[in-house]
Image (spheres, rainbow, N blue to C red):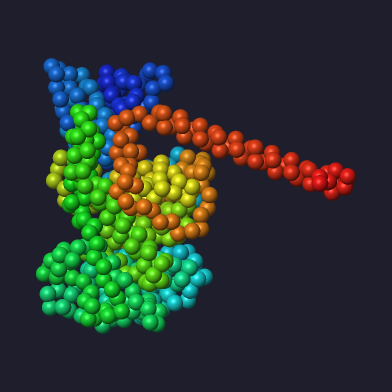
Amino acid sequence: MEFAELIKTPRVDGVVLHRPFLPTVEGTLCLTGHHLILSSRQDNTEELWLLHSNIDSIEKRFVGSLGSIIVKCKDLRVIQLDIPGMEECLNIASSVEALSTLDIVSLMYPFFYRPMFEVLEDGWNSFLPLDAFKDLESMTDEWRLSEVNQDFSVCPSYPPLVAVPKDVDDDTLRKVATFRHGGRFPVLSYYHKKNGMVMMRAGQPLTGTNGRRCKEDEKLINATLRPGKRGYIIDTRTINVAQQAKARGGGFESEANYPQWRRIHKTIERSNVLQESLIKLVEACNDQSHSMDRWLSKLEASSWQTHVKEILTTACLAAQCIDREGASVLVHGTEGTDSTLQVTSLAQIILDPACRTIKGFQGLVEREWLQAGHPFQQRCAQSAYSNSKPRQEAPVFLLFLDCVWQILRQFPCSFEFTESFLVLLFEHAYASQFGTFLGNSAAERARLSLPEKTVSLWSWVNRPQELEHFTNPLYEANSLVIWPSVAPQSLLLWEGVFLRWNRSSRSLDEAYEEMVHIIEYNKELQNKVNSLRRQLAQLETEDPLLHTP
C-alpha cells in the first residue's frame, strides 16, 4: 500500500493553527505519510510537526465555507486547524483519520525514521539480560540464566533468557509453563542484596475448578525459600475475582499445596476499568465550568487517584515483605503482564537506589516492562480521546509512571531524573519515532527486526546534551530504602501530564530555572571555599607562625 493513496489533499495554504499558550499561526498545511506539518513564513514561529500516530481522534466543524478540525492527541494535547474551503477540510480530515489509524506495524514511522544525531551508544544493546545477570552473579550463585525460551516456544511473552533457581532444570520449567497462564512460569524479578530475599513474577496458576496441581511448580517456587522461612504470594486481584478466574480455568495457589507460602489478595483493577478511569479523568481536567464541586466530584468519579493508591500500597507491601519481614515474594495477577509489572517495578524503586538513577530506571523499564512482555502496542493504541470502542487499551504504563512521580515528589533528592523524563516516556510509549515501544513482546520485536531496522529511544536519551535536560539538580545518591506515604492526603494529581495543556507552566519553569541557578551558584561558592581552605592549609605548613590557635 502507498501512503499517497490515503492523502486526498497533500497541501493547503492559509491554514490557521490554534495551540494552548502559543500565538495563532497562519501557514501552509502539508500531509506526509507520517506527519501533519504546518509551516509559516512568519519570523520566530515554531513549526508544527505532529506524528499521525499521536492523533487519538479528530472532530470537524463548519461555519459557512470555513472548516475547522479539532485534533485530539494521545499526549492529551488539543489543537485546532482552521482550513479555508469545505472540500479541503473534509479531504484533510478523512486523510488524517486514515493515516492515524493504520495498524500495520511495518508502515509505522520508526521504520522510516533516520536520526539526525550521531548514535554514540546503541540503546538496543544497553540493557542485555546477560549484563544484568553478571551483576546478580557477583551477589549470589543460587540462580542461573535459562535458554529454555530461546525460540519463544515455551512462553511467547517472555524474553529468550530468564533467571531461574539453579537447582531447577529446563524440563521442569517446561512442565511449569503448562500450568501457568500464557506459559509465564515464575522467574526472578529482583534480588535484594541486603538479605538475599527475592521477588519473582508469573502468570496465574491454571488450577481450574478441579483444583489441578503441579508438583514441578511447587518445587520451583519452594527452591527460592531459605530453610525454615516462609514466602508471600501477592495476588493483585481480589479473592472474588481470583475465585471467578477458577471457573475459566485459572485460579490461585491453595494453602494445602503451598504450605510455606502465605497468599495476600489486593485490589488492582483490570485494564478496561483503567481505560474508563483515564477517559473520565481527562474529561474532568478539561472541564471549563470552574465549579469546585463539579471538579471534585468528577475527579472522584474517575477513581484515578484510587488506582494510584492501590498500586503503590501493593508495591509497598511487596517491598516490606522483602526488606522488613526477610521473606521472598511471588507476584501475579491473571496474565502477569500488567498489574504484576506495576508492582514488581515500583517495589524495586522503593528498595533499590540503582533504579532511581537515569540509566538504572531505563534498565528497569527495559527489564520489567519491555522484556517482561507488557503489550505496549495493544495498551497504548488509544489514549483518552478515541471515539472507537476500547479493545485492549489501558493506561497501565502511565499509571506506573504516575506512581513513580508520586514517590519522586515525596523524595525529591533521591532520584537522578526529573519529572520531564517520566513525561517523555509517557509520550514515546504512545507515539514515537523510535522503535523501543513497538510490538507487544520480545518475540514480536525480534520478528520485526526492530534492533536492525529502527533506532532505540535510549540511543537518543543517553547523549550527554539530552541527559542534561533530564538530570535532577537536587539529586544526592541515597542508598537507603525509601518508604513513600500512601495516605490519600499525600497523593496528588499529576499536573505535569494531566494539566499541562490546560494552564501555562511559565511561572513554574521560571522558578525551576531560578532554583538551578541558585544550586550552580552554591556549587561555585563551595568550590571557592574548598580552594581557600587548601591555600590556607598550604600556607600553614610553609610558615608555622601563621598557624591559627
- In the picture provided, is 525 more to the left or to the right than 214? right
The residue sitting at 45% across, 39% down in the picture is 116
- Observer-nearest of 312 and 24: 312
- In the picture provided, is 469 more to the left or to the right than 397? right
- In the picture provided, is 255 more to the left or to the right than 481? left
- Point out residue 273 in the picture as x, y percentages from the top left corner: 18, 51
Q: Quadrant of the N terminus?
A: top left
Q: How many marks?
A: 0
Where on the picture, by quarter, is residue 388? top left
The residue sitting at 46% across, 64% down in the picture is 132
- Point out residue 140 in the picture as x, y percentages from the top left corner: 48, 74
Residue 92 in sight from this viewpoint: no
- Observer-nearest of 331 and 447: 331
- Point out residue 91 in the picture as x, y percentages from the top left corner: 17, 28
Residue 328 in sight from this viewpoint: yes
Relative to 494, residue 263 above or below: below
Where on the picture, by quarter, is residue 20? top left
Where on the picture, by quarter, is residue 43? top left
The residue sitting at 28% across, 24% down in the picture is 18
- Point out residue 517 in the picture as x, y percentages from the top left corner: 55, 33
Residue with the most extreme front position: 549
The residue sitting at 34% across, 47% down in the picture is 490
